[in-house]
Image: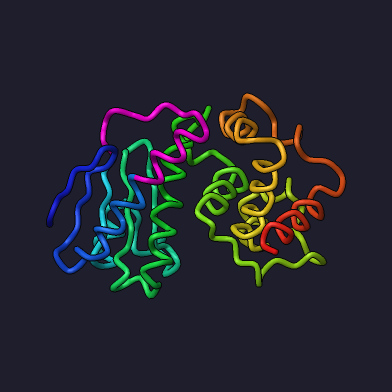
Amino acid sequence: MKNYEGNHFSFYYEEEDSDFMRSAIDVAEGSYDEITKEFEIEPERELFEVFICPDVRSYIKNTDKTEESYESWMVGNADYEKRRLCILSPRVSGRSVEEMLSIVRHEVVHIVFDKVAAKSPDDISPLIAEGGAVYLAEQINLDHIDRNSRPDVMKLSDEDYFYDNDGYNYSGVYIGYIIRKYGREAYRNIYSEKEPLEKYVYPGFEEDAIESFMKCQG
């Protein structure tokens, strides 16, 4: 396995993934610099590890999952406490290089914000954690946003409700709205539990968030 050390990450990859690795390095390093600066989060001195996993078996091993818990949609993972990011190679993920580079940025967002979390990253609600990552990685799928069946923003903090109601998409819309309307500090404060999410939610929030996103896309 080859190794490359950047400013914030130490990358490990196989020769077959060299082309993807060059782009992944640029995205990971650039995203880390951009997001820490924009949200005023102090960068860390110690390097994080990034593994470009050449197959599902190595992905399962490096993410400490089991074969029983692994699902095919799991192509990226961030573990702040172990200082490790794992990305499944585009050669085996079934996704395009562009999609996988978005996932690299998504996982970097997690690494940046988990530093300011007031509790273990595993205990942060999916609405707050995934919403910011999806929005900042520009992964919202406009075709799946429905004004008429929008999920309740507060209920998306429940994991079952989140996965049953296209939580990734809608949490990205909702958290993105908070960032645009109230500023980056608001999201950082919510993530660190200095302020409750309820401070920024009001009757009609969901409709306003979707309408705002639609206008941004237009």
Quadrant of the rendered image containing residue 139 = bottom right
Colour scheme of the rendered structure: rainbow
The quarter of the rendered structure image containing the C terminus is bottom right
Q: In this view, does 130 lie to the left or right of 35?
A: right
Residue 158 placed where, x, y %? 65, 49
Position of 43 relative to 99 (above/below): above
Question: Which residue is outermost to the top?
Answer: 194
The span shown in magenta is: 30-48
Point out the residue furthest to the right here. Answer: 203
Residue at position x 73%, y 49% in the image = 153
Q: Position of residue 62 (x, y in %)?
A: 27, 53
Residue 100, magenta (yes or no): no
Q: Is residue 40 magenta?
A: yes
User: Which corner quadrant of the image does residue 99 belong to?
Assistant: bottom left
Above or below, comparing residue 218 to residue 7 in the picture:
below
> Which residue is at 12% across, 57% downward?
1
- Residue 109 is left or right of residue 27, and the answer is right
In front here: 187 or 33?
33
Q: Which residue is drawn at 69% across and 42% down?
A: 178
**Residue in the picture at 41% in, 40% down:** 111
